[in-house]
Amino acid sequence: MDTVTITDNRTGKSIECPIKQGTHGPDVIDCQTLYKELGMFTFDPAFVTTASCESKITFIDGDKGILLYRGYPIEQLAENSNYLEVCYLLLYGELPTTTEMEGFTDNINRHTILNEGLLRFYNGFRHNAHPMSILVGVVGALSSYYYDAMDINDPEHRNRSALRLIAKMPTIAANSHNYLIGHPYVYPRNDVGYVENLMQMMFSMPNRPYEINEVAVKALEIMMILHAEHEQNASTSTVRLAGSSQAHPFSCVAGGIATLWGPAHGGANEAVIRMLQEIGDVKNIPKYIERFKDKNDPTRLMGFGHRVYKNYDPRAKIIRNSCHDLLNALGTADQPLFEIAMELERIALEDDYFIERKLYPNVDFYSGIILSALDIPLNMFTVLFAVARSVGWVSQWMEMMNEENLRIGRPRQLYIGASQRDYVSMKQR
Ligand code: SDX
């Protein structure tokens, strides 16, 4: 067995840590016995170099810009698949046969409607609430319904909860949008596809059904495939950690949604548009580039940089092309934002500051332009990211729940606080 030797040079004591190899990617040092044998923890704030689990779902090569879902390159899935088929692949590990896909689609369609009691839940939110706050609340509230599948130790219950979540997220998201703009809720339909359903629930009116635009649906379908799953990112790690305590999957995913909302994570797509709107004109780009580089200025170039990708995010390449095709097909007014984005990308990629730090456009840099070209409101961008990522969250949760010896996640720390001391009464302070 290959090992790494760790020696404490204060005591001369060593331990042999096994090296574990995966299918692709870096090997790992199995240091689970470190504390027991050397009395020390590893120290890796933000988990920059820590593998938290074994997984078969997604592989990312950040240097080569590779992303595989269950071994299939993201470029091939974006080109040939559709979002619901990708959901099946992520959940069950293989591409479905026609019969399997029909059964899966029928299963999803059976769960798209919300319990009517949940619709009253929306009324508790202010009309200027951010829809992500509504999504966190309503998804968390799902666990106060659907008691017929609450036993997370029952594989069938786990599967039913996973399908329910994937099926209901578009309905919950569209209801959030309609509630905030004062429009009536639109019920899901079983005679249209998953992405078409999301669009018609967001944009149909009782007196004017939504006319499905195939170009728009295709662009959103690609977007959702690209956002479906991404290994152990912050929101997925939240879902796994919550799930390790045996919490119900709806509560775990509510935590994932809350994590995704951050502008350093899924909230970046909304922040990119706000940044492009603030820049306003390509001639303003140089002064913004200086701000992004200024250590004393917290402003960052939103949509750039990634913890794993130190090359172009493969999803950003696909989205950039899809964005270009959509804007040309729609002849939309969003061209200026796209032009500012492309010029900003060109300038940034020539600047030493970004080159030295290997900062490239990530999935969020162009996705917002597509969403705004589809007339999706800015505050709904991260909501749609959450809808797309739901399958990734539940797939990772199911994989974890199927582990032989699932244990509660419980990181340790390096304590740097006060030494032990005695209580001093108020009179003596
Ligand atoms: C997503 O993990 C995932 O997989 C996430 C995601 C998914 O699908 O789940 O891919 C989705 O979250 C994509 C990322 C979206 N976020 C943004 O676009 C926000 C802008 N990006 C940054 O906040 C940042 O790049 C992160 C958060 C994405 C990554 O941060 P890291 O890995 O912790 O890097 P860092 O903060 O340590 O930065 C390293 C250096 C620093 O400079 P120095 O201190 O070395 O001089 O790069 C600089 C940073 O200041 N830097 C940036 C920058 N990103 C990093 N400088 C300006 N603009 C930026 N965007």
Image (tube, grey):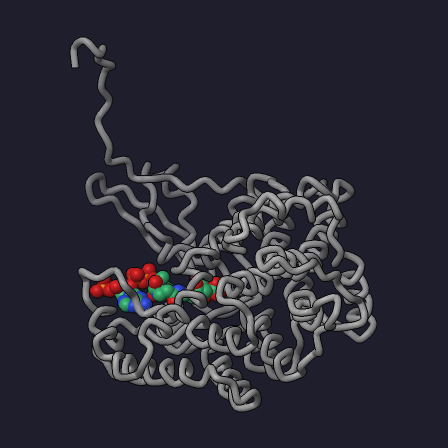
Pick the residue in front: 349 or 63.
349
Q: Residue at x 41, y 71 (%)?
A: 273
Quarter of the image holding residue 396?
Answer: bottom right
In the image, residue 278 lies at what x, y percent?
Answer: 33, 71
| Picture layout, residue 12 above or below residue 285 | above
Quadrant that contains the N terminus: bottom left
Q: Identify the residue at horizontal 80%, vertical 67% (top origin).
A: 190
Q: How far from the left and from the top, in percent, is residue 373?
A: 52, 78
Q: Does 128 sit above or below residue 271?
A: above
Q: Nearer the viewer, residue 73 or 277?
A: 277
Residue 49: image location, x then y, percent: 36, 58
The residue located at (21%, 45%) in the rendering is: 9
Q: Could you tell me if residue 271 is visible in this image?
A: yes
Can residue 239 be seen at all in this image of the molecule?
no
Question: Toward which corner of the image does residue 425 lie, by quadrant?
Answer: top left
* Residue for point 62% across, 59% down: 173
**In what quadrant does ligand 1 lie?**
bottom left
Residue 155: percent from left, percent from top = 73, 49
- The mark total stands at 0
